Image (cartoon, rainbow, N blue to C red):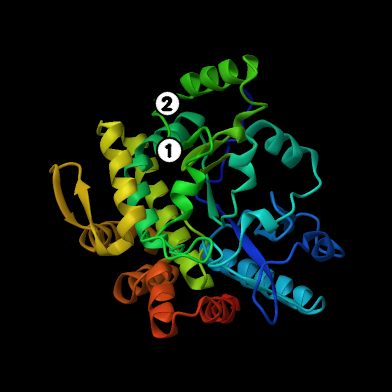
Amino acid sequence: MEHAFRGPNYTVGIEEELMIVDRESYALVNAIEELLVDAPSDDVKPELMESVLEVATKPCPDLPTAREQLVQLRRQVLAHAAGQDLTIGAAGTHPFAMWEDQRIVARDRYRDLVNALRFVARQELIFGMHVHVGLDDPDKAIHVADGMRVHMPVLLALSANSPFWRADATGLLSTRTPIFRAFPRVGIPPAYRTWDHYAESIEFMVSSGVMADYTYLWYDIRPHPRLGTVEVRVCDQQTRVEHTLALAALIQAMVRELAEHFTEGVALSDYPYAMLDENKWLAARHGLDGELVDLPSEERISTRQLARRLVDRLRPHAQDLGAEGELEGVVDLLQRGNGATRQLEIFETNGDLGEVMAEIVAATAP
């Protein structure tokens, strides 16, 4: 299986899925084709539904460079939307939109996806952020992806930003998580152990006709051989750009720690898949305000405590990578709450989901 795991190590690329909304009502608008006119071909892309757009940075040598690109991309699409009497919002779900009102983008990939998955694809009105980190060796990439499985619940708890769905407070902090779980080949991935095992697994699934290629594995974390990156996909889309960058900094530091362990020959701990999956459910349900199972000790501890401990351990890596400033956004999430908590606080004031969306739109602007 061909791959581009040739380095340099720890480059960063960030993808954000954003809402296209009306400037007055804040309702979703099926307008991606209008916004793609005159848009840079590689930086602004369609997604499954016409009310969604994706922005993507180039591979960046460090987080400060990614910050410049991401801020510019948000400003660019906001300005372009304003010219169409539209605006842009960023969160894991739109608080009151209905999936039945959304049109599917007229592209073969998305038509094929709806044909294959039917209702499951049509109701996938959710928004995520993806972070790519470059690596220089395929076996190292598999080691890092396997090792990061244990961190997916903490990343989800920090990023939870979807407490509303179809004009209802769901009681979950990340409603996006169970919605996306209806897709096949999602969630915590299997541990592949080696590049050869991964390549054999992909070849089997492709040759059997289950999927066209490895990009139809929508796991929380996956190797991306064509790009030479490890891609983290577990996070809800962040409203504030500084929180997107903070999570990217944390992810980049996680990758560096595990890559160094690979070079040093440090073996990964083997935790039960059921507990990894259970921790992810707890993170989706409670966000930062609940508990997770600390797998080495097998005891439940505060999610905030676990996240703080992780940040403290990874801070030296962020410093070495030049991302300590961006990492401070994680401290803000721990102190002031994640996006879901902030949305719920706004809603509890007047019970007005329009007010929630107005705040989301205001905070989306860099």
Dot 2 crowding, Cα within 10 Å, few <14, some 14–19, many 20+:
some
Please indicate, yes or no, whether residue 227 appears anywhere in the rendered image.
Answer: no
Determine the image quadrant of residue 226: top right
**Would residue 301 appear left or right of 3 to someone viewing this image?**
left
Q: Which residue is mark 2?
A: 192
Determine the image quadrant of residue 335: bottom left
**Would residue 218 appear left or right of 344 to someone viewing this image?**
right
**Would residue 83 appear left or right of 150 to someone viewing this image?**
right
Q: Are marks 2 and 1 in contact (CB under 8 Å)?
A: yes
Image coordinates for residue 274, horizontal then vertical, percent: 28, 34
Q: Is residue 144 above or below residue 36?
A: above
Q: Which residue is mark 1?
A: 145
The one nearer the camera, 254 or 131, is 131
Q: Quick one: SS at disc 2?
A: loop
Q: Name the mark on residue 207.
A: none
Tell me the kind of residue under disc 2: Tyr
Image coordinates for residue 254, horizontal then vertical, percent: 38, 50
Q: Quick one: SS at disc 1?
A: helix
Q: How many marks?
A: 2
**Would residue 311 appear left or right of 345 to someone viewing this image?**
left
Please tell me which residue is depicted at 38% across the width and 35% down the height of the picture. Answer: 146
Residue at the outermost right position: 38
The one nearer the camera, 254 or 279, is 279
The mark nearer the N terminus, 2 or 1, is 1
